[in-house]
Amino acid sequence: MKTLLVLLLIIPSLSWGLTFKNGESINDSLDNNYLISKPGILFISPEELKSEIRKSKDLNSVCDEERFASYEDPTFKADKSFRGMQITDKLFEQFNPLYKKYCLLIVNEINNDQKKYQEIKNEIDNLFIYLAETDYLLNFHKDPDDTDHAYATSITATPLLFVYSQIRNDFNNDNKNKIDQMFIDLIKKNEYGLNIAVGENSSYGNHGFYNNNIRLLVSILTNHEGMFKKSVSYFLNQMELNQTNNGLFKFDSKRGQCALHYNLHGFSPIMSTIWNLNIQNIKLTNVKINGKHTLDEIVGTLIDSVNDPRIVIKTNKSIGYNKSGIKTCWEAEKIKFGNDEIVLPYTSQMWFAPYYSLTNNQENYEKFSNSSLPKLFKYQGRDDANLVSYFHKFIYLDKEMNFIEFENTFEKITFDDLEF
């Protein structure tokens, strides 16, 4: 079954508002311009999100009808034996459903169903207060020599962070301070992940982008200028360190057969960061963001590499092909070129939605729609959680212009496995 999805440029101005001197890097030029101009706004303001949902022809189907569980008296307990993906799976299971819970809250508010609205509101409010008071997020094991914990909690805490940003002003000052501090403490716990195993010579640079992305979001949420400046500087430095001759990412291109997968996987937090910086009037779409290539050029090369993986293989070999990299990505379809193998993309590619909404680049639009990537443009409740992908239709897309066909592969979130 096919469905028409539409991508609209929702940020009206794409002009670059900062002036560069000869020989000056992006980071140098921005150094005195790392300012939070819209504190508290992550991805979309509450008013804009409600307005977009209100436009829906069938409000009853907006949140994808299904059975719902309650957050009443949750019994979350961090299992300290969990490592890496175990933490990721557990937190996705517990927190991704918050997206739908908040969606239902908005729908009931629009429908003026005060009883249902208040029931859901109380559940969500109580969940945040409970998590802040129990330090649930902070109690999982952290291996100081491994970035897996920072990587796992950086992606999976985003549903909490986004929903909280939408309702933050509803809390009294005492609870607001407690919940803010919970997220700030999580960033402090995870900062080790920005200092080890994610540098110039590492093949795990995507961990740094994911970790830094949530640091940026927390800094905007709490209006923490110091944290914000560190996040922007880190992002631009890592982009420059990632530079290659064709626009692929240096860190991810060292991962052998997994290089194509990780080049695409790492673009998810990169687009989340670029989107949210754009809201703060730091516009990176029309500059050489890695010092050599523009965003359009990087995306064009990524899509070209999907259509012809030999581009990735050539880049692999030019910077140090690492066949052991196959061990770092799950088994998926592979394609052979002589003695070389490349794992083909298999996870969500929703990063294209914010990219196209910001740039309206028709050439890359055509490349994307004619590639194998549209079949991976889907909400899975897991992949691209850091893009708040549950609400992608309302944040990045519009049905009135720029139509593109994608397979209708929306997968429902369920609460069957949650423990309360």
Image (cartoon, grey):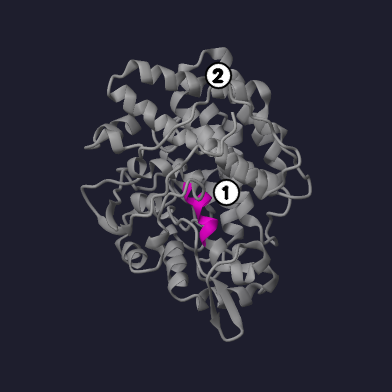
Q: Is residue 39 visible?
A: no
Residue type for callout 1: Phe
Q: What mark, if any, has residue 235 been given in the picture?
A: 1
Q: Is residue 354 magenta?
A: no
| Stretch in magenta | 264-273
Q: How many marks?
A: 2
Reading the chain from its start, which is encountered first: label 1 or label 2?
2
Q: Nearer the viewer, mark 1 or mark 2?
A: 2
Residue furthest to the bottom in view is 338
Q: Secondary structure at mark 1?
A: helix
Question: Distance between the Cα atoms at labels 1 and 2?
Answer: 28 Å
Residue 76: horizontal and vertical position, in percent?
64, 29
Q: Secondary structure at mark 2?
A: helix
Q: Is residue 111 visible?
A: yes
Residue 178: horizontal and vertical position, in percent?
61, 20
Q: Which residue is mark 2?
A: 176
Question: In the displayed structure, does residue 101 sit left or right of residue 325?
Answer: left
In the depicted view, which residue is nearer to us: 32 or 81? 81
